[in-house]
Image: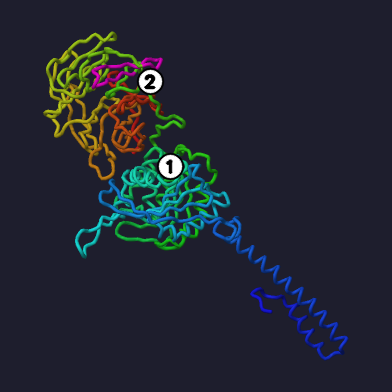
Amino acid sequence: MKSTIPIETDLIDDDSAIASLVYQSAASRFLTIVLAALLLTQCIAVVRARAGDSQEDSGRASPAAGAESKEATPEGSVEGPFPLMSTIYPGTQRQYWVYVPKQYDPAKPACTLVVQDGKNRADEWNLPRVMDELIHAQEMPVTIGIFVTPGQVPALKENAQPRYNRSFEYDSLGDAYARFLLEELLPEVGKSYNLSSNANDRALAGASSGGICAFNAAWERPEAFRRVICTIGTFVGLRGGNEFPMLVRKTEPKSLRVFLQDGNRDLNIYAGDWWVANQDMLSALQWAGYDVKHAWGDGGHDGKHGAEVMPEALRWLWRDYPEPIKIAPNPVGERRLELLIPGNDWLPVSTGHQLAETPVCSSTGELFFADARAGRIYRVGDDVKTRVFKDQAGRISSLAFGPDNKLYAVRDAKQVVRFDADGKEEVVLADTKCQKIVTLPDGFYISDDSVPALHWCTYSGKVSMAATLTEPVAAFSPTADHAFMHVTPKDRPFSLHYQITPNGQLEHRQRFGYLHVPYMDRASGVTAMAVDKKGTLLVASAIGIQALDQLGRVQLIVRKPSKDPISGMALGGPLHDTVYVTAGENVYARKLDTQGATTHASPVQLPKPQL
């Protein structure tokens, strides 16, 4: 009898002794045969027992450690490919496959794992088998896998290449791919399967360009995706991915959990060094306080190491499920300018207006704002109730309080008027072109987009030219010490800095503040500015509220309260520690670790900036 399991030496020696007894007497020979039979029976029992041990060891070495043997694990199915057309990426065609675990119950919403680069990537990671075992071992929830390829636009001519969209879709920053997932892919798959819409139940994964794509989609829409696996991620300068470490450090932390993998022999080409870039991403995520784990190796730009660590990555990604992934706490590293207060988020203050705009706060911190389309000015009292302050006020484009505690307003782009506490109106400038107003103790500035220019006006109505400009103004504000004026031209990625002279003139113009803009856009979307008593400049922009230090550097980007653009911003509240913004039909408020400076009050002495 032959066996693949080795037999111990003492058993082999006993077999040799049996053979030497053949020449003994018949009785002895019979006894020998009986003994030999017993001994062979014992050998067979040992062989079978050890074969069983070997099978158990093989089961323990399966991809999902701790699961039962391969034969005992329920196997899911992979269905597809299915075609999918896109309008977000016009003319593109692609395919997707759906992994359905054996435990899937159509009556219960399933979690989802979207893998970029289709079934080839999923097979490279042995993903269906790994998910089978992890779901069976209850180390991840019942999860539908969606394996989707990048799009292509076929060529209409023979012997011509299609438009390969992989790099454009995957390496680009911005929200286009997240919208493709949310508006096209998931709804299409959701027609056939019951998919959870909870962000905590959704994961994204990819390798190389697909890896940065997975991270970017979750980064753009953390309210829709919370879990990310990124192997050999392309955080380099192909299409701006090299900016991610900086954005992670500056942007208000988001509720994400991220697994990174890379090897020290990854690519090092014209766009950057993948190994260095992934370490930079890890450093940024750790610095900002994210829930992040990494697996570094000595591999190259391939999927071998990613496949090895995939069970660990998925197990870690879904640990403690269904506990929700929370927003990261304050950064571990030092941010010189820290405004965020843990646990304080945006809250609605006043809702349902036609178009809320131009918020402003009085000396006591009381909030006023205009509904431009309704032609009304509202006030929000200490009881947080919204009341009409002035009806039939006209088209108000800007509001500011003066040192006389009266409310100054730009109306119909041709008048400056002021209202007393009872809403009684007085015209300050009857016929002038103006859009925005900013008040100081001894006068105010108005912007004129038609010239364009900034004018200095006394409260008695005397007007003089302060500065001619090369383009219209989006927002402007004096520094808290009233020594300089911040000015942001419309849609520019920078702010200007002017010196304020004793007679109100603006001199020594210089580009000063650096602003971040949306991906592949040159317009900053700036709409408002506010300053605090430490010299911080808050700039409401398309990507959020950018907080600049005294030297014009963005140190923090506070996220917007909604998808609507911010139309106006002011610092107020009883302690002047609340930022109010208008966005669409609504007004929102959020407490910050700051104290706003009232520009029409006496100037404050600012600290010397840290270089």
- Kind of residue at badge 2: Gly
Question: Does residue 392 sit above or below 33 in this rendering?
Answer: above
Pick the residue in front: 106 or 432.
106
Q: Position of residue 286 (x, y in %)?
A: 45, 45
| Residue 206 relative to residue 160: left or right | right
Could you tell me which residue is drawn at 16 percent across and 26 percent down? 454
Does the magenta segment cover residue 340?
Answer: no
The image quarter in which residue 405 lies = top left
Circles 2 and 1: CB atoms closer than 8 Å: no
**Which image quadrant is residue 458 in?**
top left
Q: For residue 288, which numbered disc appears in the image?
A: 1
The residue lying toward the viewer, choosing from 235 and 355, is 355
The N terminus sits in image quarter: bottom right
> Where does residue 314 sit, x and y in percent of width and height?
50, 51
Quarter where residue 27 is shown: bottom right
Image quarter (top left, top right, bottom left or bottom right) of the C terminus: top left
Q: What residue type is labelled 1?
A: Ala
Q: Residue at x 41, y 58 (%)?
A: 119
Label 2 – label 1 distance at C-alpha: 29 Å
What is the magenta range? 367-385
Scheme of colours in the image: rainbow
Earlier residue among tags 2 and 1 = 1
Element at badge 2? loop
Please give the label number shown on residue 247.
none
Q: Residues within 10 Å of mark 2 (few under 14, many from 20)?
A: many
Q: Which mark is residue 573?
A: 2
Is residue 86 visible to us here? yes
Q: Is residue 377 magenta?
A: yes
Q: Is residue 277 visible?
A: no
* 222 or 86, nearer to the observer: 86
